[in-house]
Structure formats: structure tokens, C-alpha cells
Amino acid sequence: MAYSGSRLISSLCWVFHQHAGQEDVLTMINKVNDHMTCGKDKGVNSDTGNPEETQRQLPSWLVETTRKFYLVKVIPASDRSQADMQDELQCSLASLGCFFTSNETRELASHYEDAADTHRRLCGELLQKYSRRKDELLKEKMENSKLRDELAKQTMEENSKLQDEIDSREK
């Protein structure tokens, strides 16, 4: 598939076409950067008119998300093969328990609108589970830290006793 536009747009389209659905957006943006920086461009020196290699420009991205997010890879109906049409699109929240699937992107979009409350509930439940697990891990970490401190204290006391015993034997 050929992509038209600037090198940035071509790279962006190519990377997103290849990796959407499997990679998160930030990873794909990094792949775009890699794609943009490999090799050198051939340009013309404006002063001498001689061909020369120039460095490629690197796009600058500002990403302020706190979690990974993914795009659903959708194949336009005109580009679908018979095998593609048999593949079902599933809700991006399938891993949280949403079982919606469809062959039509319109139905999937409609599902997202209709199931917004259900999805918020699923996300809320997942967030609560995550928060509880985070608290449990923090508690375990604090307990492990206390045990480490106690062990270090005992070790220091034993080393001190052994050193005192060695010193007394030497006298």
C-alpha cells in the first residue's frame, strides 16, 4: 500500500497501518521516529548546486498520558479480502469482560456509545482491583523493609558480639 504526503505523514501512516491493534500509540510514535531517522536524505546545496546528504528531521512529540493506550485496527470495507470479512472486531475492553464482537465498524462504534456506562463500570471495577492490589503490594513492601531492618540489626549485634569475643580471646 502506497502512502502519499510528506515523509512524516507517510511514515506515520505506514507504522500505524503495520502496528495498530498490536502496539500502543507511544510505541508506534517511537517507531515513526526510528523510521524518520534511518538513512539520510539527498538534497542540493543551495550555494553550490551540488548534491549533498542532509540529516533527516525528527518530529517532536509531546505525550502526557499516564497509561498505554491502543487504537483498534480497522480495515476499510473496500480493502477487505473475503478472509478479513470473516474476522470479527471485538470491543477494546474485551480483556475487562466485554464480549461484544461484530464484523462492522459502525456496529462497534454504536456499541461504544450504547455501552459507555457498562464500560465505565468495568473500568471502575478494574481500577478498584488495581488500587487494592497496589495497597497490598505497598503493605508487603513496608513489611519486607521492616524485616530487612531487623535482620540488619541482628546481624550487626551478632557481628559485634563475635568481635568482642575475638578481642577478649586475643587479650
Image: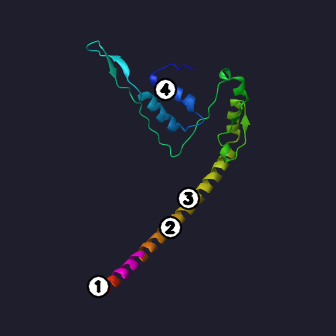
How far apart in space, not on screen, are marks 2 and 3 (Cα)?
Answer: 15 Å
Q: Which mark is residue 144?
A: 2
Dots 2, 3 in contact, CB < 8 A: no
Judged by depth in the image, the label closer to the viewer, 1 or 2, is 1
Q: Which mark is residue 30?
A: none
Identity of the amino acid at label 4?
Ser
Query: Which residue is disc 1 drawn over?
Result: 170
Q: Which label sits in the foreground, 2 or 4?
A: 2
Q: CA distance from mark 4 to mark 3?
A: 39 Å
Residue 34 location, x and y as percent?
44, 32
Marks 3 and 1, how far apart at CA: 53 Å
Q: Nearer the viewer, mark 4 or mark 1?
A: 1
Q: Is residue 93 magenta?
A: no
Which residue shows up at 29% across the image and 85% down it?
170
| Residue ID for mark 4 | 11
The residue where tag 3 is placed is 134
Q: Earlier in the sequence, mark 3 or mark 1?
A: 3
Inspect the image, locate mark 3, and give the three-letter code of the amino acid beneath it: Lys
Q: Residue at x 40, y 25 (%)?
A: 39
